[in-house]
Image (spheres, rainbow, N blue to C red):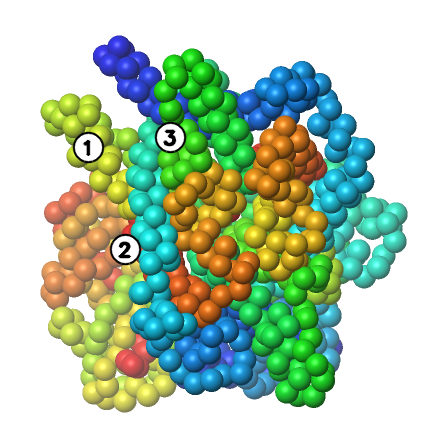
Amino acid sequence: MSETPDLECRDICKSFDDFRAVDNVSFAVPQGKFFSILGPSGCGKTTLLRMIAGFQKPTSGDLLIKGRSVVDVPPNKRPVSMVFQHLALFPMMNIGANVGFGLRQRGVNKTDVKKQVERVLERVGLGGVADRAVSSLSGGQKQRVAIARCMVLEPDVLLLDEPLGALDLKLREHMKIELKQLQSEFNTTFVYITHDQSEALVMSDQIAVMNRGVFEQVGTAKELYYEPQTAFVAGFVGEANRFAATVEETGDGTLTLRTDAGRMLTGVAAGQGLARGTAAQVFVRPEAVRLSRAPQDATGNAGEGTVQSVLFNGANSQVLLRDGQSGAEISVALPQTGEFRDLQQGDAVHFCWSPDQTRVYADG
Amino acid sequence: MADRSKLTFYLLLAPLLLWLVTLIILPHVGMFIVSLREKVGVREYETSFANYAVFFNEPLYWNTFARTAYMSVASTVLTLLIGFPIAYYIAKLTRGRSKTTLFLMCLIPFWVSELVRTFGWMILLRETGIFSSLLQYVGLADAPVEMLYNDAAIMVGLVYTSMLFMVVPLVTTLDSLDDSLIEAGYDLGASGIAILREIVIPHAMPGIVSGCIVVFMLSLGNYLTPILLGGKDSLWFTGLIYSQFITRFNWELGSAFGFLLLGLSSLIVFVGLKLTRQSLGKTMAQT
Amino acid sequence: MITGIPQSGAFKWTYRAYVALFFIFLALPLVTVCVFAFNDSVFPSLPWEGFTWAWFFGDEAPYIGVFHERPILRSIVTSGIVAFWVSVLSVAVGTCNAFLFVRHDFPGKGLLYILMLLPLIIPGIILGISILVFSSSVANTLEDATGLWFDGLRPGLILVVLGQFSFITTFATLVISARLQKFDPALEEAALNLGATRWGAVRAVTLPFLYPAMGAAGVVAVLMSFENFNTTLMLVGSDAPLTITMFDRLKLGSTPVLNAVSLLLIVVSALLGLASLLLEKRQD
């Protein structure tokens, strides 16, 4: 891995008056990767992206593109392009003029501009629309024009600022796949910011989860989902049952805890600072819980509960259980084997989950 | 029910028609008829284009007409050039309270009578005025300097008086320009000039057109500023109309002059709207 | 506001200096007028001879202040009367027009709408002379036919009111129509549904909704009427409104009493202007 990354951030900070929007963020994106920054609104991801694009200057830290520092390079000279949240296609120009805008700024001659515009439009599947007005396109087509407008400049890094946010649900699902395909087709480094975890999980090679100006965790979708390193990541990525608990005993890697509602649990320590008596957060994914009609062998965390309600949603159906012992509510993914098809409100069921799917984080 | 709503309709239509017919249409038709009358004796008239012929045969008249037109064009262009950066500053580089304050500061001078504004410029520019005294005080002049009664003074007055009608529509259109379009332009490698030319100005075009039309009309029809700042010999067409009507009692010629001015101003409005494919209603709604 | 575009320091400061200069340019004539209202000299010019209130309250020649200057006081009253009638008439007709254009569809609507806008593009002086010519010929005809006098059709306050009304109504119509367009007709239907008569519904629901716009239009009408010069000049008779009186004084050269009047005008117009903005803001 001696290759220089396409984009590297070193200890980037950005403060507004007394508010720190981005706090000591460092990361590197290797060439050709799809890198997402996932976080709730207000977490600083937009500020970070705008610093990479050059619209904001970091308070401290360094930004390198292909190994070269660009902190002092104005946005119109940076080898990065950006797809804006609402795309920012120029309504006063037709599609061809939009896509050719950047080339014209570089002083490329007219015939070459025309050729390159046509080529890139064909690559995004929109050949022959150059003379049409932007307003004649559908939402998904506009998306592709916005990407073509950037890609025609062959940027080192393409930045995308939640470009799918304005689309309706169905088109969004479709565009996720299409964006991923475009990225591998152009083989350009993408940096994508979003608050929608499914966009990030589906498309990205690497995801950074950002919260309150810092990166909580950087990893692949699987790592984030199965081995979240902080309570925030565990709660933000995917769904989880969350219990407040106190550590009763510590062993080698396993912990015994008592939830505030009074149930004993065994789990694995996913973070630091879990000594005896500390308050902790316990996370269990709904699909980690196994249901059965008969009692199960009691290794791990098991118990009996009553069905509160069945939330039927095809493959994503869920059952809400009331734990008979503690009275806590537990959400369980409904197994699709047909065994529980006739499950009804008020039915008694047994449940269990294994300790290594019980992730424990120090509270706070 | 239908009869009731018909009645309402006619009741609403009546004031509109009364206003337009008696105060706008008939007076202009009447004025046109008067302009076609040639006086041949005491209270005896013939229909002819004699009054219009007088206009074209007398160089003073059509020179004044042409001069009024190109001075108005010049003041329109100047107002646009001076006002555009201000409108851009207000619309794009300020926000919140300071934006409102700057905008109000633009509006206030125009709620005040044009007479007061012109009076201010007279105090500043005349021989015994502030600028003259200041120049003498600093030593740049050793005798009083008369800055009134020339074309530059007229131009200052016209630009000052029309500024609002340029700035307001410009601020309105520039406000509606999405900032991310400008950022996208920079991101794609454009320079400030290129952005101005390819994104900002095309977007602001409706505002530019409506501002220019209004400013041109106001300058063309202005009477106070040229007379007070330009003096007796300011050669402004409205001055000619006034003297034909009030001093010389030659209403026939005065009406002909009036029609020529009206024709020029309508022509400019029409051409302006056609060139930019705007509608009168939309343009006027911006001011 | 665009934060993202880096600009060189020199450019930024030049731009700011330009904006500052512009606002100085805007304020300069008005400030000058106001300052010299307090100069203890019979000419509104330098040198500064000391501060005085004489141009407001003085009653000894040549220091006759505004409040003792009969002709000016009279012309202020005249202007006030004219402005009142113009405002009342134009708001009334403007409201009717708004209902007509927003609520009704009829053949020729587009044409009438254009005609309604026309007064905006007719130079004020031409509006003035056309009304002058027309009313005089009507008066001549009537007098020839009946042998009676029709003074109302000769230059005078009635013509001034009509002349100003003829174009201010367009502004009133635009302001009130814009407001009426935002009105949800369902509110009126609800009133009808609850048993109101059609006129009762309009009076109880629609008109109150329009009041702020009507108020704003009325204030704007007063402002425009007070400062109108071009149209008034052609139609004025023996009772001159304030702008005409001031214009005559200005041509001759005058004492700073004109500055004092101007100062009062500036204060009152600024207040009225702010009032109209507040009224329009209340609509949201």
Residue C152 - label = 3
Q: Is residue B146 left or right of residue C78?
A: right
Do the numbered discs 3 and 1 sit on residues whose CB atoms are within 8 Å?
A: no
Q: Is residue A231 something one can see in this rendering?
A: no
Residues C150 and B18: in front is: C150
Q: Residue furthest front?
A: B42
Residue C81 at x, y percent in the picture: 31, 45
Residue at image position (73%, 63%) is B193
Query: What residue appears at the point 33 percent right and 35 percent down from the top-left corner?
Result: C89
Looking at the rendered structure, the number of numbered marks drawn on it comes to 3
Host chain of mark 1: C
- Whole-percent x and y of residue B228? 59, 57
Q: Answer above or below: position of B128 versus A157.
A: below
Which of the two marks, 2 or 3, is nearer to us in this view?
3
* Spatial separation of the CA atoms under disc 2 and disc 1: 60 Å
Q: Please, what is the three-letter code of the amino acid marked with disc 3? A: Gly
| Res. A332 mark | 2
- Is residue A175 or residue B90 the one in the foreground? B90
Asked whether the residues under marks 2 and 1 belong to the same chain, the reply is: no
Q: Residue at x 35, y 62 (%)?
A: C69
Give the residue type that dot 1 points to: Arg
Residue B174 position (above or below residue C46) = above
Q: Decide if residue B197 is in sight here.
A: yes
Q: Badge 1: few (under 14), some or many (20 or more) residues near its Cα, within 10 Å?
A: some
The tag on residue C231 is none
Seen in the image, is B75 located left or right of residue A210?
Answer: right
Of residues A140 and C6, the one drawn nearer to the viewer in this rendering:
C6
How far apart in space, not on screen, are marks 2 and 3 (Cα)? 90 Å
- Which element type, helix, strand or loop, lies under badge 1? helix
The residue wearing badge 1 is C203
| CA–CA distance in space, label 3 to label 1 | 35 Å
Observer-nearest of A89 and C263: C263
